[in-house]
Image: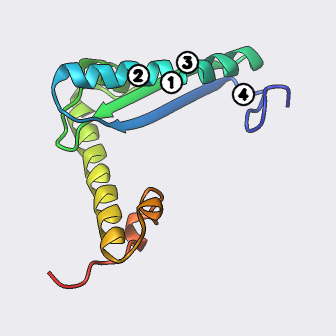
Amino acid sequence: TRAGPGVDAQVTKVLIVELTVAYPKDEEALQKAYDRKLVKYAELVEKIRTHTEAVVTYVPIVLTQVGSCAQTTRASLKKMGIESGQLRRVVDRCCVEILRADYAMFAFRCAGGSKAQANNPPPAAAAPQPQGN
């Protein structure tokens, strides 16, 4: 299509969500990570807007492994339709998935996978289990 590969020009709504794990966990570092993601995806969002008539929403979600998130991340989650009362549950669930992915990469490396392979590990359920204690 004229919109480019992977973009359907007839689409009316596009929601781009990216989960980022930031460290350290202070508010300023989380905000900087959030701002970097806005800049990183601005060109993609603009391209989609230019080549389609879609309403494009980009939602960066920046968390730490222990569930800290910036006010801007809370606003992003609300933008996705997540109500205030559900925010903590959603953040906690994201953190569980972050920890699972970290464990999968750790287990993969312990089983002899290379650093390059660890950057693209198999799904957590398929990750090799480390031997011994």
Amino acid type, callout 4: Val
Q: Earlier in the sequence, mark 4 or mark 1?
A: 4
Residues under labels 3 and 4: Cα distance?
Answer: 19 Å
Which badge, 4 or 2, comes first in the chain's sequence? Answer: 4
The C terminus, quarter of image: bottom left
**Mark 2–mark 3 CB contact (< 8 Å):** no
Q: Which residue is drawn at the image coordinates 35% and 23% (left, top)? A: 34
Query: Residue 89's image quarter?
Result: top left
Between the residue at mark 4 and the residue at mark 2, the CA separation in whole angstroms equals: 27 Å
Can you tell which mark lies on residue 11?
A: 4
Marks 4 and 1 sit apart, C-alpha to C-alpha, by: 23 Å
Quick one: SS at disc 3?
Answer: helix
Contact, mark 1 vs mark 2 (Cβ under 8 Å): yes
Q: Amino acid at mark 3?
A: Ala
The residue shown at (76%, 32%) is: 8
In which quarter of the view is residue 129 placed? Answer: bottom left
Image marks 1 and 3: residues in contact by CB distance under 8 Å? yes
Q: Amino acid at mark 2?
A: Arg
Q: Nearer the viewer, residue 107 or 16?
A: 107
Name the spot of residue 88 as percent of width and height, x first.
Answer: 20, 35
Which residue position holds label 2?
A: 36
Residue occupied by mark 3? 42
Give the residue pinned by disc 1: 40
